[in-house]
């Protein structure tokens, strides 16, 4: 139909992907076995692209709390908190978030995407200025579209460019809100926070940081990059999500700026969508309560990240600039990127394929995200398979030393499912070795 | 923004136009012929990322900020030159 004609280029890309293998957007898992394993197309697969940083999706206490809330309060709230009122869990979770961050107030949103829309789109209005990083997440760009503020981009992670832009606005009335992310979701690079804050303070701007990928991941108690950098008192607004380390869904805005509550009444993504269901709130509360004490998991997570980063780097891949729980292989050749991603899938490793324009500098990315629940064997196997396929594709030049044995794949499962084992033919294992 | 304040013929020698073309060159495809009427999004072999990088370079060269909504209004290079003059006046 003509109304879909404008999507032809998109559809062409999708068709092209499907013609050479799988398409990321139409993958369907047969079964989720654990935070790090699933069955995909009948094959047991290591999950290396789920943002499940602390591996909490199968946490028994979270599951129990969720079930309890489902039984006691039903399946959903059937409306927004403005229209239908709040459940006790909503307010309790907000209080717990504020306490966790050591901030005055918190506002829940139904996703992290909506938290950014609701926070950024509302805080900066007509006559104000939004200064956003060039590599911002889609939710930040979309928030800008929702806002009546003038939107100015600065070069990625470049405090000097930001300063220039604020300098040019120095005589203009209107609030200036800088928006950055702690860990950038495509390459895993972190914001130079101290330098950014120095610029913000010099020009009297406000700062909002999206800690989506750093909650539970960075800082002694998992509060994120701001905690790690020791700059929390300089931060005006933090947004975040429950969809990554917290292992469920939901988003939030926390702040020390007095009077935050009024944002609820001005924030359309808060007012005009249903609030989080009680079971989700209950699982989020339980998972959040674990974050501060999850030091063992954080250590595991960073050990795993270092192992993957070092392994791929040694194999000769071009990676993002720093070790992080997001490790991305950068490629210029779309065909090879797609082939690497498909090759890994066929061999039983699931990663994310990220294509321009969603990627910085037009890279084709094989993006992986690491979990504390990964075993060292799983990571070693992923490195080994990446290197093998990368060499076959000519992505990496020289043979690298071989790491873990492929047989480890079957030892690596934290939650072995007997049924799965029985169904799995030994022929499949052979395919894994050969892929 | 579709009517440049200067005619195309005059534009060729305009200092802002010359700077725009200079900054555009490294981002445009090698065989692109650049003229005041070139449509930035479709005639120069540039995707949205290349355009963003070009705008950053141009901002630095002219010591000027070009906000997003202004970029969105620009179609041709002549439009961009006109937008720059307007922004310089407002600054
Ligand atoms: C930086 C960043 N912000 C926000 C979001 C949105 O989070 P959610 O999945 O909760 O909508 C994401 C996730 O994709 C993200 O990477």
Image (tube, coloured by chain):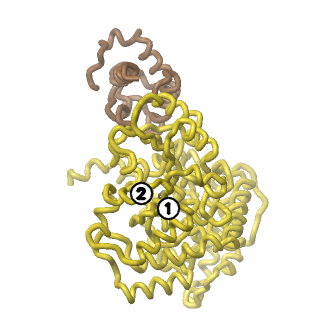
Where B4 falls versus A287 (above or below)?
above
**Would residue A28 be found to the left or right of residue A245 on screen?**
left
Q: Are marks 1 and 2 on the same chain?
A: yes
Q: Residue at x 60, y 48 (%)?
A: A191
Question: What residue did someone put label 1 on?
Answer: A104
Marks 1 and 2 sit apart, C-alpha to C-alpha, by 9 Å
> What hue represents chain B?
brown
Location of residue A62 in the rendering, given as x and y in whole percent from the top left corner: 52, 81
- In front: A306, or A29? A306
**Residue B82 image-quadrant placement:** top left
Location of residue B13 in the rendering, given as x and y in whole percent from the top left corner: 41, 9
Packing grade of label 2 (10 A; few <14, some 14-19, many >=20) is: some
Question: What residue did someone put label 2 on?
Answer: A260
Q: Residue at x 22, y 52 (%)?
A: A3
> What hue represents chain A?
yellow
- Do labels 1 and 2 touch, CB within 8 Å? yes
Q: Residue at x 30, y 12 (%)?
A: B7
**Earlier along the polypeptide chain: callout 1 or callout 2?**
1
The answer to whether residue A401 of the structure is visible from this angle is yes
Q: Secondary structure at mark 2?
A: helix
**Would residue A266 be found to the left or right of residue B64 on screen?**
left
Q: In which quadrant is the C terminus of chain A drawn? A: bottom right
* Subunit bearing disc 2: A
């Amino acid at each position: 139909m003509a109304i879909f004609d404008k999507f032809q280029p998109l559809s062409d890309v999708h068709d092209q992907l499907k013609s050479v293998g799988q398409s990321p957007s139409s993958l369907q898992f047969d079964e989720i076995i654990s935070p790090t394993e699933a069955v995909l197309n009948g094959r047991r697969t290591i999950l290396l692209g789920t943002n499940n940083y602390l591996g909490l999706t199968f946490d028994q206490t979270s599951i129990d709390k969720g079930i309890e809330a489902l039984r006691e309060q039903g399946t959903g709230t059937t409306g927004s908190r403005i229209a239908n009122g709040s459940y006790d869990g909503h307010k309790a979770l907000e209080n717990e978030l504020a306490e966790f961050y050591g901030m005055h107030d918190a506002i829940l949103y139904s996703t992290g995407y909506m938290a950014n829309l609701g926070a950024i789109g509302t805080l900066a209005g007509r006559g104000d200025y939004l200064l956003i990083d060039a590599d911002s997440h889609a939710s930040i760009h979309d928030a800008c579209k929702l806002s009546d503020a003038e939107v100015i981009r600065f070069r990625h992670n470049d405090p000097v460019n930001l300063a220039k832009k604020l300098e040019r606005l120095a005589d203009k009335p209107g609030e200036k809100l800088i928006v950055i992310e702690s860990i950038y979701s495509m390459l895993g690079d972190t914001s130079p926070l101290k330098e950014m804050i120095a610029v913000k303070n010099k020009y009297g701007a406000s700062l909002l940081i999206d800690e989506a990928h750093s909650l539970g991941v960075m800082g002694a108690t998992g509060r994120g990059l701001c905690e790690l950098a020791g700059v929390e008192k300089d931060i005006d607004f933090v947004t975040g999500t429950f969809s990554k380390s917290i292992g469920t869904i939901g988003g939030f805005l926390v702040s020390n700026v007095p009077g935050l509550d009024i944002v609820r009444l001005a924030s359309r993504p808060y007012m005009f969508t249903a609030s989080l269901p009680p079971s989700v709130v209950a699982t989020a509360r339980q998972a959040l309560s674990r974050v501060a004490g999850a030091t063992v998991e954080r250590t595991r997570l960073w050990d795993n990240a270092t192992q993957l980063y070092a392994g791929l780097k040694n194999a000769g891949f071009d990676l993002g600039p720093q070790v992080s729980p997001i490790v991305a292989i950068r490629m210029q050749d779309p065909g090879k990127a797609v082939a690497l991603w498909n090759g890994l899938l066929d061999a039983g490793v699931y990663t994310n394929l990220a294509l321009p324009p969603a990627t910085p500098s037009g890279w084709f990315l094989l993006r992986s995200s690491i979990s504390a629940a990964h075993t060292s064997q799983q990571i070693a196997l992923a490195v080994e398979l990446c290197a093998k396929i990368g060499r076959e594709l000519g992505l990496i030049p020289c043979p690298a030393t071989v790491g873990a044995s492929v047989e480890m794949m079957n030892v690596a499962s934290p939650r072995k499912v007997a049924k799965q084992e029985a169904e799995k033919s030994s022929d499949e294992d052979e395919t894994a070795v050969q892929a | 923004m579709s009517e440049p304040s200067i005619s195309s013929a005059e534009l060729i020698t305009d200092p802002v136009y010359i700077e725009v073309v200079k900054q555009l060159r490294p981002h445009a495809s090698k065989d692109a012929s650049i003229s005041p009427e070139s449509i930035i999004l479709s005639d120069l072999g540039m995707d949205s990322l290349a355009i963003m990088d070009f705008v950053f370079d141009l901002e630095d060269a002219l010591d000027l900020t070009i906000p997003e909504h202004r970029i969105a209004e620009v179609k041709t290079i002549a439009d961009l030159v006109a937008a720059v003059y307007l922004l310089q006046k407002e600054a």
